[in-house]
Amino acid sequence: VVSSLPSYLLEMSAISFLLALLLIALKYLILKSDLKKPYIILELTPPHHANQTPLATEQFLTILHSLGKQRSLLDRLLGKKKMYALEVVSTREKGIRFLLRTHHDEAQIIKKHILSFLPGVKITSVDDYLPQDIKTLGASLWRTVSLRLSRHYSLPLQEQKQLNQHDPIAYITGQMTKLEDRELVAA
């Protein structure tokens, strides 16, 4: 069957296969280099009275999302993405903390947007909350628990129109209180 195909089709399929392999290898190398880039963790301490509307919070998250979309043409062609992680972490010693993990080169612009959204917020750079030698600690000292959705992920979440009557993060932060010594909860 192969010998009946014209030679130019065989060459084209071989070239397409090699290009696909090259693209996969390139994406792997880009992801590997992105994970090795130095990052910074910003701790956000909101003021006591933050009177932000749900619409303002939605707009702030839209701005963060648009910052992630601003990439050069080469980065878009290579599939390189900007990575941000919004984390809520709790320990007995430090309490509940709101963290934002990003690369060093993005930190300054993110700080400016956070301060324009919430002028009284305190932003400090902190160390990683996970121990560096987690693999050498032994399985008896730490445990990871994965949570699953009770229904299919494509089912819509209920829209909350009056957030002054129901705080969507209250359930999560409620589970992060009264921790034991050396216990850490992160979401």
Image: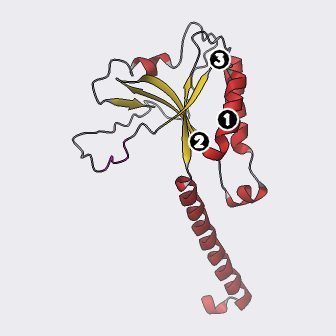
18 lies above or below 109 = below
**C-alpha distance separating marks 3 and 1:** 15 Å
**C-alpha distance separating marks 3 and 2:** 21 Å
Q: Report the residue that reaches farthest toward the bottom.
A: 3
Residue type at mark 2 is Thr
- Give x and y (percent) for residue 20: 63, 71
- Say which residue appears at 38% left-offset and 30% top-offset: 185
Q: Point out the tag, 3 or 1, that comes first from the N-terminus.
A: 1
Q: Which residues are magenta?
A: 131-135
Q: Provide the residue designation for mark 2.
A: 102
- Give x and y (percent) for residue 40: 55, 41
Contact (CB < 8 A) between labels 1 and 2? yes
- Say which residue appears at 33% left-offset and 39% top-offset: 144
Q: Which mark is residue 120?
A: 3
10 Å neighbourhood of mark 3: few (<14), some, or many (≥20)? some
Q: Point out the tag, 3 or 2, that comes first from the N-terminus.
A: 2
Q: In front: 101, or 12?
A: 101
Give the dominant element type of the magenta stretch: helix, strand or loop.
loop
Q: Secondary structure at mark 2?
A: strand
Residue type at mark 3 is Gly
10 Å neighbourhood of mark 1: few (<14), some, or many (≥20)? some
- Give x and y (percent) for residue 165: 56, 6
Query: Is residue 48 among what the camera can see?
Result: yes
Q: Point out the tag, 1 or 2, that comes first from the N-terminus.
A: 2
Q: Provide the residue designation for mark 1.
A: 110
Residue type at mark 1 is Ile
